[in-house]
């Protein structure tokens, strides 16, 4: 092991390798591009779920407003793509050519000032990372400095999600309203709707996800990660030991927000539109559920949890379009009641000991079953 | 799916001409039956899910989530139409099979399911969507994978896609005649515009406002409330303060129920001469939730009412009730959804093929004499020529048609001077 | 905007607007009281609160249907019976849910959020399967419709007055139940110190179940009353959930009095702003103000100082 990766344990490497094999070899080979694109879409939610593992599982801060950050990232990307799609030639039937179609429908005659900078790709990328961080910092600083925690934080973030949704829908001249920003075509001239582009985006998305996982492992292995766990278990003792608890919480909340925003931006690229239905309360809660299903303590579990819930959602709803909510609801209740530690908990209790035993007896290379979730610890 | 010996719908209409037309259509279908198999390749050159005796179509509506309230009727109508077409021998000799997907009131889900229907199931047409947002979400999918969407809802216009047939009315068709009527018949001078906060009510009210101002009359207030809003006492007080002749309401969904109940409770009596309440968003389906006694006296402008008095409609209502029970009501959108499969069938038969491009080319000019709303015809811009009617709500939840335009209204999704 | 009107017109409008605010206040209190008990007192984040309300609404719908068809002579008063039935139906479902689900989760409050979210999905689907996806219309007796004209220009909706009276009755009943009865004393004891309460001989499990059922039952009554002013459909419960939680949190979760105070503050703010601004912006501004104040004063308007 070289110096760059010295913080990764053998187990982490195994987990990364299994996930990489699943995402980059097994899935692309076994499913067609339509399903692969769906997997890509699900994986964008995994960014949010990973962020939630850090702030909820590790830090004990449950945010019910992660959709806000997912939406911010997605909208930033969508604004850039929409401006690119709204060339004067493409929009010449409008009364004001050159502005996005929904602005024209709402009698706007020039581009609003805050749309201007999104003509630049560099600015857009920076905005995707920085805007959510600033927003999370404002919310986090206000709340954590006053020691708001637990349920209160959850409800307040939920209200923020509600406010932002109403605002986006109400200001439809500037935001596209309830329709969202639709019909996105190209990224710097590159058509994102073709099958080949979908493949490229899928792999880009997967690569980013792996990078984020490595980054998270690094954070968790650092002193910060240990402090987070200490915070969750006995906040007062950490405070009495002289640490400024609020700053750590703010940091991890901002970090999770940035991860969500990256997911949002990748979502827009792969799906081709962004709408306020991702900002609201329902998607925010669903994202928490992905994380819970995966096991809230495991970043790998979060990825598998996201995949599992979405796979269940898609399959149930295709097979029983009129009854599938029963299955989904039951799944959530079962996870809470029967498997409180989610997939990661099942893995740790059932699979991990056997893998270990198997590794010991055979002394052969690691070859865990691909579908099994991996624990991060 | 099979018809249990009952003669239903369009085939059983009594008027000679229509019967003749229907028989002719059926005969064409049957005569094609033998030929169809021989020319299976001709009818399907683009890899659609068409076999020698079946053709697959998609139904894509929300059956869960908040929009299921509205979209259920459309699903029922589409299934009924498909069943009736199959009973008549299908399309080009092929029975229609449908794949139903749930959009779950969530626009990205609509896009995902639309793509699944087109890419994986390779359906020959999709009947579906309800809200503008869901249509906007699936539109790029239909254009990219070259599918055919039959969209049933009255909507704001500002769109014209070769891959979509809009079987509902666009905003100018629905609005202008109604306002002209209320001005002429009720002597309305001032209007209060009200709506749920999204694109359809806003665009519709914009068109209404332009038209009202063109007529030299005044708009005394315009206001929007978030979707799902349930407290309207404040705006009702404002309406009382402004005393408009017409309350022009485009409130949708659960808000509708709250709005009309509170309006009635606040002592605004719609059965009196003033103010007139005019809406374009309350069909018989919505009245079911609002309660007929709460909306009695209001006027609605749309192209279809269940009470429409013609033979086509009687047969349609009868078949619908036979299938879904006597309690069921049929609204404007439900009827428009019912037209979808029939218009598609007509286009396929005119083109002699299921190929999307041929259907696109064949669609303009297609007529339907057997539509419950009467005669409709597809315009060059893929919308329907149709009549606009004004209905007067009665306490039993039905509308009494008090006015209908003499001619068919031309669909004009990009109206000059109204944008 | 007032230049064109006479003083008397303005006076009556403000009077009516005041009534509108009071009605909104009553609606908020009804919505929030049940949750204040479940969430505020017991710490259970019940995301299915809206669905319990809708259960009450459906019970009312069934009653109206049955009475209308079989005993039309009683139609004028069926609403009272329907509300009582709604209370018991929701309370029974609540007790069942507490037994099957919630009691395993008292030590993990955030998990109750996930479990009740799953429950709300299932309840919505159940309503849809049983009553159909369309909204149902609840027929009301005639005396509940229309308005009372106090003067020529001031009219007060009767159903608004009814909701106000109902709210008063329920609030008083809850007060007596929580602060003047044995059950309330036990509930408060369990909330403040579960172990000690158990040690002095209170059957904490039974108290939990009763309290949860009580909260759900009040939600059922609220849902029953809301058939007068809102819609009854499978997903209608979702419309109320955010507002309800905000009201309870804003009031200070542990304080029932706080819930009432915050209902008053939020309803007045909202109805005043709705009058001067357009609908959507009024809603955004109200929520923003509430969130802003909560950030400055996270414990809410009223907070109990208790040792945990």
Image (tube, coloured by chain):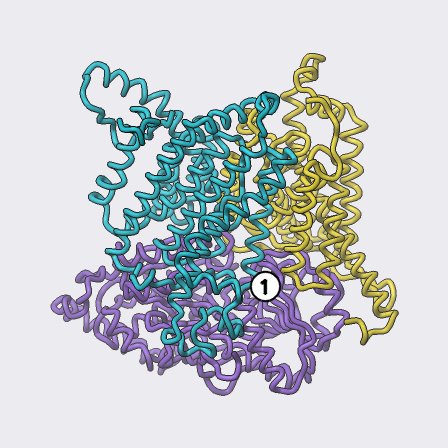
Q: Is residue B405 placed above or below C258 in the rendered structure?
A: below
Q: Which color has been applied to chain A in this rendered view?
A: cyan
Residue C238 visible in the current orientation? yes
Kindly identify the residue that appears in the image at 55 percent across and 65 percent down: B284
Along the viewing direction, whichever of B17 and C56 lies nearer the viewer: C56
Residue B375 position within the rendered picture, expressed as x and y whole percent measured from the top left: 41, 80
Residue B389 position within the rendered picture, expressed as x and y whole percent measured from the top left: 53, 78
Residue C139 visible in the current orientation? no
Q: Which chain is yellow?
A: C
Residue B346 position within the rendered picture, expressed as x and y whole percent measured from the top left: 30, 74
Q: Which chain is purple?
A: B
Locate the C terminus of chain A and report the quarter of the image it occupies: top left
Circle 1 Cα neighbour tier, 10 Å, few/some/many (<14 / 14–19 / ≥20): many
Residue B36 position within the rendered picture, expressed as x and y whole percent measured from the top left: 16, 69
Where residue C217 sits, quadrant-wise, is top right
Along the viewing direction, whichever of C228 and A173 lies nearer the viewer: A173
Which residue in the protein does label 1 denote? B196
């Amino acid at each position: 092991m070289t110096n760059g990766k010295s913080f990764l344990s053998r187990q982490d490497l195994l987990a990364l390798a299994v996930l990489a094999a699943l995402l980059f070899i097994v899935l692309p080979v076994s499913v067609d591009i339509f399903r692969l694109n769906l997997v890509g879409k699900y994986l964008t939610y995994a960014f949010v779920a990973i962020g939630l593992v850090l702030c909820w599982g590790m830090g004990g801060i449950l945010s019910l407003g992660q959709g806000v950050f997912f939406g911010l990232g997605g909208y930033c990307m969508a604004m850039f793509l929409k401006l690119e799609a709204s060339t004067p030639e493409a929009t010449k039937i409008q009364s004001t050519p050159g502005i996005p179609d929904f602005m024209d429908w709402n009698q706007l005659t020039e581009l609003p000032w805050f749309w201007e900078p999104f003509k630049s790709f560099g600015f857009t990328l920076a905005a995707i990372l920085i805007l959510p961080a600033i927003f999370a910092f404002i919310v986090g600083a206000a709340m954590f400095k006053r020691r708001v925690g637990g349920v209160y934080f959850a409800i307040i973030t939920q209200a923020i999600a509600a406010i932002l949704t109403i605002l986006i829908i109400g200001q439809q001249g500037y935001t596209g309203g309830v329709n969202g920003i639709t019909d996105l075509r190209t990224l710097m001239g590159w058509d994102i709707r073709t099958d080949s582009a979908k493949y490229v985006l899928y792999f880009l998305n997967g690569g980013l996800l792996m990078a984020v996982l490595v980054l998270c492992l690094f954070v968790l292995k650092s002193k910060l990660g240990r402090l987070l766990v200490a915070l969750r278990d006995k906040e007062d003792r950490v405070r009495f030991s002289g640490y400024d608890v609020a700053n750590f919480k703010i940091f991890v909340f901002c970090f999770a927000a940035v991860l969500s925003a990256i997911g949002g931006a990748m979502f827009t690229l792969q799906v081709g539109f962004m709408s306020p239905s991702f900002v609201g309360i329902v998607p925010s809660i669903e994202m928490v559920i992905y994380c819970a299903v995966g096991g809230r303590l495991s970043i790998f579990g979060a990825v598998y949890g996201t995949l599992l819930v979405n796979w269940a959602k898609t399959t149930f709803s295709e097979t029983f379009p009129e009854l599938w909510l029963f299955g989904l609801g039951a799944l959530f209740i079962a996870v809470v009641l029967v498997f409180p530690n989610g997939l990661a908990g099942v893995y740790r209790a059932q699979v991990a000991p056997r893998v270990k035993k198997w590794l010991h007896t055979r002394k052969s290379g690691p070859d865990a079953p691909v579908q099994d979730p991996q624990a991060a610890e | 799916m099979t018809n249990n010996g009952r003669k239903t719908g369009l085939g059983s209409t009594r008027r000679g001409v229509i019967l003749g037309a229907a028989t002719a259509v059926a005969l064409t279908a049957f005569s094609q039956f033998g030929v169809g198999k021989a020319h299976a390749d001709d009818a399907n050159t683009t890899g659609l899910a068409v076999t020698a005796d079946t053709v697959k179509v998609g139904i894509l509506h929300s059956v869960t989530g908040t929009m299921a309230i509205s979209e259920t009727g459309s699903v029922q109508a589409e299934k009924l139409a498909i069943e009736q077409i199959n009973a008549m021998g299908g399309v080009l000799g092929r029975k229609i099979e449908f794949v139903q997907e749930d959009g779950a009131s969530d626009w990205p889900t609509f896009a995902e399911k639309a793509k699944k229907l087109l890419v994986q199931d390779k359906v020959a047409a999709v009947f579906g969507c309800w809200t503008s947002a869901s249509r906007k979400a699936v539109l790029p999918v239909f254009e990219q994978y070259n599918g055919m969407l039959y969209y049933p809802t009255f909507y704001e216009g500002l769109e014209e896609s070769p891959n979509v047939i809009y079987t509902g009315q666009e905003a100018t068709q629905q609005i202008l005649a109604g306002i002209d009527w209320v001005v002429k018949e009720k002597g309305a001078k001032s209007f209060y515009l009200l709506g749920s906060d999204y694109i359809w009510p806003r665009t519709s009210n914009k068109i209404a406002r332009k038209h009202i101002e063109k007529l030299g009359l005044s708009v005394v207030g315009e206001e929007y409330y978030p979707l799902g809003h349930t407290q309207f006492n404040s705006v009702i007080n404002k309406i009382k303060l402004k005393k408009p002749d017409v309350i022009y309401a485009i409130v949708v969904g659960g808000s509708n129920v709250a709005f009309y109940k509170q309006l009635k409770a606040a002592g605004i009596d719609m059965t009196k001469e003033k103010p007139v309440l005019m809406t374009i968003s309350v069909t018989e389906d919505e009245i079911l939730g609002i309660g007929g006694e709460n909306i009695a006296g209001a006027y609605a402008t749309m192209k279809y009412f269940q009470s429409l008095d013609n033979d086509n409609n009687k047969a349609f209502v009868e078949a619908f009730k036979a299938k879904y029970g006597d309690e069921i009501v049929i609204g404007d959108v439900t009827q428009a959804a019912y037209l979808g499969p029939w218009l598609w069938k007509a286009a396929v038969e005119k083109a002699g093929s299921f190929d999307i491009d041929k259907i696109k080319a064949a669609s303009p000019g297609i007529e339907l004499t057997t539509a419950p709303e009467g005669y409709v015809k597809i315009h060059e811009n893929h919308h329907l020529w149709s009549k606009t009617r004004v209905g007067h709500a009665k306490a039993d939840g039905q509308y009494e048609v008090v006015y209908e335009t003499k001619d068919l209204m031309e669909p004009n999704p990009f109206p000059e001077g109204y944008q | 905007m007032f230049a064109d009107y006479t003083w008397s017109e303005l006076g009556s409008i403000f009077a009516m607007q005041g009534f509108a605010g009071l009605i909104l206040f009553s609606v908020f209190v009804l919505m929030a009281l049940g949750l204040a008990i479940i969430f505020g007192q017991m710490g259970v984040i019940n995301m299915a609160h809206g669905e319990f309300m809708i259960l009450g609404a459906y019970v009312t719908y069934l009653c109206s249907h049955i009475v209308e068809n079989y005993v039309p002579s009683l139609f004028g008063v069926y609403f009272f019976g329907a509300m009582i039935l709604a209370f018991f139906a929701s309370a029974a479902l609540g007790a069942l849910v507490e037994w099957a689900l919630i009691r395993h989760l008292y030590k993990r409050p955030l998990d109750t959020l996930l479990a009740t979210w799953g429950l709300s999905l299932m309840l919505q689907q159940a309503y849809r399967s049983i009553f159909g996806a369309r909204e149902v219309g609840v027929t009301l007796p005639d005396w509940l419709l229309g308005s009372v004209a106090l003067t020529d220009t001031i009219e007060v909706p009767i159903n608004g007055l009814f909701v106000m009276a109902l709210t008063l009755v329920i609030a008083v009943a809850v007060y007596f139940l929580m602060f003047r009865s044995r059950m309330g004393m036990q509930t408060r004891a369990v909330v403040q110190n579960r172990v000690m309460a158990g040690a002095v001989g209170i059957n904490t499990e039974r108290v939990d179940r009763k309290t949860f059922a009580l909260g759900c039952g009040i939600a059922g009554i609220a849902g029953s009353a809301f058939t007068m002013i809102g819609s009854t459909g499978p997903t209608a419960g979702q419309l109320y959930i955010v507002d309800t939680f905000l009201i309870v949190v804003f009031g200070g979760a542990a304080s029932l009095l706080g819930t009432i105070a915050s209902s008053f503050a939020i309803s007045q703010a909202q109805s005043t702003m709705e009058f001067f601004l357009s609908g959507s912006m009024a809603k955004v501004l109200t929520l923003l103000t509430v969130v802003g104040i909560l950030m400055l004063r996270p414990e809410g308007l009223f907070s109990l100082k208790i040792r945990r």
